[in-house]
Amino acid sequence: MISAIAVQSEHLYHVTFTDSWQDRLREIQAERKILIITSREVINHTGLKTEGLNLCLVPDGELAKDFATLKSVWDFLETHGVERGDLIVAIGGGSITDFAGFIAATWLRGVEWIAFPTTLAGMVDASVGGKTGINGTSGKNLIGSFHSPKEVIIDLALVSTLSDRDFCAGLAEVIKCGFIADPEILRILQESDLETLRSDRGAEALAELTWRSVAVKAKIVSEDFRESGSRAFLNYGHTLGHAIEHHSKYQLRHGEAVAIGLHFAAHLGVKHLGLDRESYQLHRDLLNKYRLPLKFEGSVFESLLSVMRLDKKYQDGIIRFVLLREIGKPQIFADLTEDDLASAYQEVMS
Ligand SMILES: NC(=O)c1ccc[n+]([C@@H]2O[C@H](COP(=O)([O-])OP(=O)(O)OC[C@H]3O[C@@H](n4cnc5c(N)ncnc54)[C@H](O)[C@@H]3O)[C@@H](O)[C@H]2O)c1
């Protein structure tokens, strides 16, 4: 089975669905010189056959998105004489695709790259859209570049080895896509459950959820690649989520922090945009059902606020939030004072 979703960014590329990712990798390797950026852990999880591959190993997870790793990989590329016409291939979760994409963006002022996402979060979100980067000292994803891949290749068989924790973290972004743009996603999630989605019985539902989430992202990115408008809707749940993720020193998964951010944003939606209580409750029900957290420490709002001031939507002293008027109708809301946010935070986290 091969099918694809097109994304129009600085160039047109495809998110291709395959059931034989290692064969695709070998085909690509036969065509040109490739350098694979991955981690030892990803190799072990995915069973990547490494023989004859040119590998550059980075630390696992969020540790990859670090300046020291960046410097060591630039040194590696220099030593190995990676040239303009060579191809960087990222194999891993969102941390590795973010990092490898940024390497590709910066090496020789930009070389081509391909992503093989190996986590659900990587498939439905991180590898699609061309945002690449690393974390700064005081905030998440502060250093980066728009640099779209040449292709994204998804093999859903790879998610079978994910822990439930990482699988559910990926579902947080699926849930987000459902709320901002595709209620059918929410319906499928309501009808299914974690055990089913992780079993053969749920394979079709999981494939549809993944396809629909990629389609939501591809459509929004194709309309607004550089985030001058609607692309910001993809940040639903992320303004608080990023601050929580950073505050937790990356002990929480990105998707877990986003889940808390979604709950908070739904509460703000009810208070400030008239989102109905049923839709708020649906946020809570789906996050609970898929084992995602709803709450964070109640006493740390000031510290989260200082991180939220670094959010890319922060402008003229105002933290802008993506909120919902109703399901499928997101908007940027700029009328929230820091006091509004503080009181909403206490209400949600208590
Ligand atoms: N660029 C974007 O638009 C964008 C969008 C969403 C998220 N992100 C970024 O993505 C990152 C989160 O991605 P993530 O949730 O994939 O986390 P991750 O990349 O940190 O991976 C989480 C864990 O999953 C393991 N893993 C990877 N593949 C596996 C497999 N097939 N089986 C078992 N375990 C496997 C990894 O070893 C790691 O320990 C964050 O840094 C986030 O900022 C970027």
Image: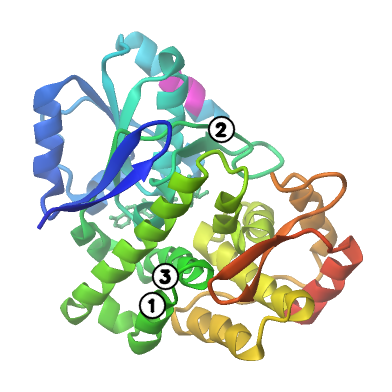
The three-letter amino acid code for the residue at tag 3 is Cys
Residue 174: numbered disc: none
Q: Mark 2 points at which residue?
A: 144
As drawn, 11 above or below 202: above
Please name which of the two marks, 2 or 1, marks the residue nearer to the observer: 1
The C terminus - image quarter: bottom right
Q: Residue 40's spot in the image, x, y percent?
A: 30, 41
Residue 228 appears anywhere in the view: yes
Q: Earlier in the sequence, mark 3 or mark 2?
A: 2
Mark 1 crowd level (few <14, some 14–19, many ≥20, 10 Å Cα): some
Indicate which label's residue lies in the foreground, 1 or 3: 1
Classify the position of the N terminus by image quarter: bottom left
Q: In this view, does 290 lie to the left or right of 29?
A: right
Residue type at mark 1?
Glu
Read off the residue under disc 1.
184
Indicate the secondary structure of the residue bearing disc 1.
helix
Tell me the residue at 30%/33% (across/down). Answer: 150
Q: Name the dominant secondary structure of the magenta segment.
A: helix
Which residue is drawn at the image coordinates 15% and 47% (left, top)?
21
- Is residue 317 toward the left or the right of residue 205 in the image? right
State how far apart marks 1 and 3 are (Cα).
Answer: 18 Å
What residue lies at 54% left-to-right and 66% top-to-bottom?
Answer: 256
Name the residue beneath numbered marker 3.
Answer: 168
Magenta part of the protein: which range? 70-74
